[in-house]
Amino acid sequence: MELFELTLHELHDKLAKREVSSVEATRALLARIEATDSRVNAYITITPDEALAAAEAADRRIAAGGLTPLTGVPVALKDIFVTRGIRTTCGSKILGNFIPPYDGTVVAKLREAGAVIVGKLNQDEFAMGSSGESSAFGATKNPWNLACIPGGSSSGSAAAIAARSATATLGTDTGGSIRQPASHCGCVGLRPTYGRVSRYGVIAYASSLDQVGPVTRDVTDCALMLGAVAGHDPLDSTSIDLPVPDYAAALTGQVKGLRLGLPKEYYREGLDPDVKRALDVAIEAYRGLGAEFVEVSLPHTDYAVATYYLIATAEASSNLARYDGVRFGHRADGAANLIDMFRRSRAEGFGAEVKRRIMIGTYALSSGYYDAYYLKAQKVRTLIMQDFMKAFEQVDALLTPVAPTPAFKIGEKVDDPLQMYLSDIFTIPVNLAGTCAISVPAGMSAAGLPIGLQLIGRPFGEETILRAAHAFEQATEWHRHTAQL
Ligand code: GLN
């Protein structure tokens, strides 16, 4: 087996036994990026010199007995995470030359754990998208079929895992951006509960919905990554002061007696037959492991996409006001005056989808429309949240599809934003409810594309969904399938 093929925990075991060094593992990963990324375009920036220096430091630390689960492991970050001294673009031309003066909290935590950052990953511009196509740095390709999208917005995070050009990655999930690409690329992706992971130094899209989480090869890796980045942070007032459990210890393999809900609104016509079949087989597998199923209802599901696209765009229009060409980012040349400079910088720097969202959000917040759109959306959000809380009175977790179809073709939905928005129909409600969910490989389409299943947990129920995902993974072979590149 090649070094780049190892999971995080397999590499960790080899580092612990001194069978390999971090420098060897890092060199193998950098060579893999070199061999694959011209086709996949998972990376925006590759940092070989910094990575090798960090790997040498990790090897010294290991020799001194300071090994933690992430020490010496090559990881890569969505380009939404602010990294000191390393260009951070958020997939946008407006931040095309932005070199941050500080590290975000999760980046600092990874560095402190001795992880080796090999580069920054491609994404939809400002995390707005479901396909990876809205990046100013070109579309990312799905390693399983280069004609297909990898999903988005954490397109590079999932594609790098599928291409085995990173051992583990971090993404963000505002409406599905970790889970949907993980599903399309055959990876594990977890969106934690709102407040579980600090967002200090994560470029904001929609602040009441954004969360940071891992995209990995398997569930054990996911548990280890989550444990490394979770926890309270005084620099993020929305982060919650709760102890971080030992997530890896939660992976007992036991789901006997676990009560799983099947929301009837998630199993209707319109679901792709391959996805439906994969879910049916998965449900049987869980039954075989001793889980119990209960039909539940989330009656406000149909309103989730519309609600999300009002709240997310409203928050985005406010968050993106800071890109004005004054303090950082692109500044247009030749402006006649200050207002003209703002206008031209933003017109040149933002792509079409970002402009669309800023306009929708500004409209929804404007006086006269605020009550009809934004306030109404907030009320519906509460109803959606209550649907979940009611369901969790009956069950421990919900089992649903991640996306209504497997990965679609590049270009198929770019001219139809509404179709694109509907790709997130099963992931968005989780963000509105503020709870956690995981995507885990659960099958393949007839065309040979991966299909994930989603387990939705109670707020701060990450251990339960990780345990259930792990038990399924151990009972099936889906996570062993690899994209041929
Ligand atoms: N596709 C959704 C959007 O474009 C979700 C994106 C995300 O989770 N960042 O808003």
Image: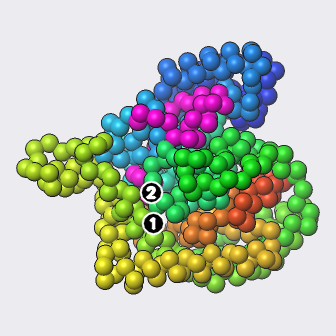
Alpha carbons under labels 1 and 2: distance apart: 8 Å
Residue 388 seen anywhere in this rendered image of the structure: yes
Which residue is nearer to you in this view: 166 or 211?
Answer: 211
Give the vertical position of 39 relative to 477 (above or below).
above
Report if residue 103 lies within the magenta region.
yes
Q: Which residue is mark 1?
A: 312
Magenta-tinted stretch: 100-129
Residue type of the residue flagged with mark 2: Tyr
Report if residue 411 lies within the magenta region.
no
Percent position (x, y) of residue 38? 45, 34
Residue shown at 19% from the left, 55% from the top: 343
Residue shown at 75% from the left, 15% from the top: 64
Percent position (x, y) of residue 408? 51, 59
How was this image coloured? Answer: rainbow
Give the vertical position of 431 relative to 196 (above or below).
below
Disc 2, ligand 1: is the CB inside 8 Å? yes
Quadrant holding the C terminus: top right
Q: Does dot 1 land on a helix, a strand or a loop?
A: helix
- In this rendering, would 208 be left or right of 6? left
Give the vertical position of 482 relative to 16 (above or below).
below
Residue shown at 61% from the left, 65% from the top: 434
Percent position (x, y) of residue 148? 50, 53
Percent position (x, y) of residue 281? 78, 65
Quadrant holding the N terminus: top right
* Label 1 crowd bin: few (<14), some (14–19), many (20+), radius 10 Å: many
Residue type of the residue flagged with mark 1: Ala
- In this rendering, would 316 be left or right of 183? left
Do labels 1 and 2 touch, CB within 8 Å? yes
Residue shown at 88% from the left, 60% from the top: 255
Disc 1, ligand 1: is the CB inside 8 Å? yes
